[in-house]
């Protein structure tokens, strides 16, 4: 395992979310297409990530497709709390064993950051709580 050095380019706050648990909220406006920052965590093997998913109920993992994964449940940062939404205001970009977050559209001060997680280890069995009018119902 090795720790990822991360940088967040905007001020964020973690607090209770109406979507699920805690969320990441912007403390300043963020412009469209701006890089918000890199998700923190530990690089682990994809095999270890799959083992953790079976063992831990609530975990933040991103698999890269190269046999590696980012375990954002350990040594993370505020971006770990970006909740899923079927109508997100951010997107993730995976490159060079990094998970970068970018703005899809302008985010207002105090607005919650959301992202469409895409395929997850939940395999469409976890109820989605995003509240979007376009909600697909499951993650």
Image (cartoon, rainbow, N blue to C red):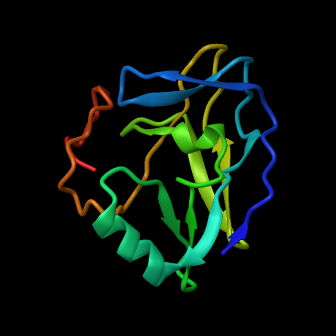
Question: Where 128 falls versus 57 (above or below)?
Answer: above
Front in this rendered view, residue 37 or 33: 37
Question: Where 38 falls versus 53 (above or below)?
Answer: above
Instruction: Tell me residue 126's x, y (percent).
Output: 21, 49
Front in this rendered view, residue 13 or 88: 13
Figure quadrant of residue 134: top left
Residue drawn where x is 28% and y is 50% of the image: 139
Instruction: Tell me residue 128's x, y (percent).
Output: 26, 40
Front in this rendered view, residue 1 or 83: 1
**69 lies left or right of 16:** right
What is the number of callouts on the image? 0
Instruction: Tell me residue 2's x, y (percent).
Output: 72, 72
- Quarter placement of the N terminus: bottom right
Question: Where 25 falls versus 38 (above or below)?
Answer: above
Residue drawn where x is 64% and y is 49% of the image: 76
Residue drawn where x is 29% and y is 26% of the image: 131
Question: Where 92 falls versus 12 (above or below)?
Answer: below
Residue drawn where x is 76% and y is 39% of the image: 34
Figure quadrant of residue 79: top right
Instruction: Tell me residue 85's x, y (percent).
Output: 39, 37
């Amino acid at each position: 395992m090795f720790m990822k050095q991360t940088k967040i380019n905007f001020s964020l706050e973690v607090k209770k979310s109406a979507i699920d648990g805690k969320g990441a909220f912007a403390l300043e406006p963020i412009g469209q297409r701006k890089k918000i920052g890199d998700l923190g965590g530990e690089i682990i093997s994809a095999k270890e990530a799959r083992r953790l998913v079976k063992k831990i109920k609530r975990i933040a993992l991103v698999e890269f497709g190269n046999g590696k994964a980012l375990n954002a449940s350990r040594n993370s940062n505020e971006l770990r709390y970006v909740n899923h939404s079927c109508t997100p205001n951010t997107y993730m970009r995976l490159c060079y064993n990094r998970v970068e977050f970018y703005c899809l559209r302008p985010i207002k001060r105090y607005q919650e950051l959301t992202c469409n997680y895409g395929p997850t280890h939940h395999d469409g069995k976890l109820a989605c709580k995003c509240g979007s009018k376009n909600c697909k119902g499951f993650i």
